[in-house]
Amino acid sequence: MVNFLYGLKYNLMSILKNIIKTLLSSFGILFIIMFVLVYSSFRTSVQTFISDNLFGKLDINEIKILPKNARADNIFTPGSSQGASISAGQVKSVRAMKDFTETFSITQLEYSVTIKGEMMGRSMETFVPVFGADPAYFKGKDKFWNRFQNRMPVPVYAPNFTLKYINNFLNIKGLPQMKADQFRNFPLEFKIETTPQTHPDRKKYKLDAVFLSFTEAFPFTGAIVPNSFIADFCALHAKDTGKYKKGYVYVMMFARVKDTKELPRIVAELEKLGLKIESQKDIADKTNRALKIFDYFSASILSVFFLITVISIFNSYLTIVYNRSNKISLRRILGVSKLRIITGFLFESAAVGLLYGIIGYYLANKLLFEIAKNIKELIPVLADVAINPVTTEVMFMALGLSMAVSMVSALLPAIFASNINLFKAVRK
């Protein structure tokens, strides 16, 4: 016990004597810990943002049904323009299945459509794909769902991420940012052309519309109107070209499963119908794929930091071993074991790593606070990303990493120290 206390006292005194040199040589650990903590928090925040705004959300008992030839990377532009559609027969078969409590269909208008709106004295007009959805699908997802009916002016939903693009555009123009509620009841105008530009009797129809809300239910770009509006409009203008044209296609369906345990069998049956299925797991997989590039880039930066830091600490401890060789050799002559020599170095490096871990934790939280406060100015398109402070679990992980990096870097020099030639060291 006495020897242990003596060894502990010696190690503490040794750390205090060499603390400045050791801290300077290990300074890179601080950057590693800050990077890991900021990256961990930022990645979680971005993952939630992407999941909520780009890929949509599904309830736990909900599946998304897609055409068999829908491209896996075709995230933002579904529909007939990509050659992907669900036949009327397939829609009828899905609706007839007794495994679902409810089914909802998504259609796409096959006419050229422009949407016009005026904001802050400026008029903007752009081509936009128009999709139809069943109003009941929004029940429980949006409090204004009962206003999403086939009426005039036509009610319009838009995907959540549309708000980010609008605010990014406003920021570029030097205009103030807008909140989702400020767009509600915003007047719009649809211009739908039911004939080709080369047609001798071109027909274009202007329809008043009103913006209803942004929604996280759909991940694709475009305006969303009631299915019944699309069906009625297309039936009214089916022969505008002189030949019958249905005017819309089914591009997607949503279905709520009675028993999720039966999902494998249901998926197999839908695949037999020539359809593709997406569930919560698939949405998560898409989110993770989208983050891979972010992860690879961050890992490469972290690897460089790690390598430089380890080399720096390694060289520093080699210098320390050389400078302390006389003391180390005398301790060995006095009977101090190799293990105690190694333990002393590792104890010192662990203390330095712990100190940098604590400092890195507080600096990372400070940096995250500044990012959260200024993200609207730094990255307007991510203005709604909620940047959260580092959690306790991540903090302890970072402290462990900091100590491990420092100890691993010091291990080899510690082994060298324990094997110093006693006579050569004394003759120095």
Image: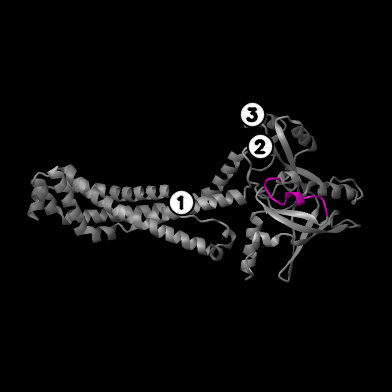
| Helix, strand or loop for disc 1 | helix
Which span is picked out in magenta? 139-151
- Pinpoint residue 190: horizontal percent, then vertical percent: 80, 58
Chief SS of the magenta region: loop
Task: Read off the residue under disc 3.
Answer: 262
What label sits on residue 277 in the rendered view?
2
Q: Quadrant of the N terminus?
A: top left
Upstream in sequence: badge 3 or badge 2: 3
- Pinpoint residue 3: horizontal percent, then vertical percent: 13, 44
Question: Looking at the image, is mark 1 or mark 2 nearer the viewer?
Answer: 1
Magenta region includes residue 140: yes
**What type is the residue that disc 3 sits on?**
Glu
Upstream in sequence: badge 1 or badge 2: 1
Residue at image x 84%, y 57%? Answer: 197
What label sits on residue 423 in the rendered view?
none
User: Which quadrant would residue 168 be assigned to in this image?
Assistant: bottom right
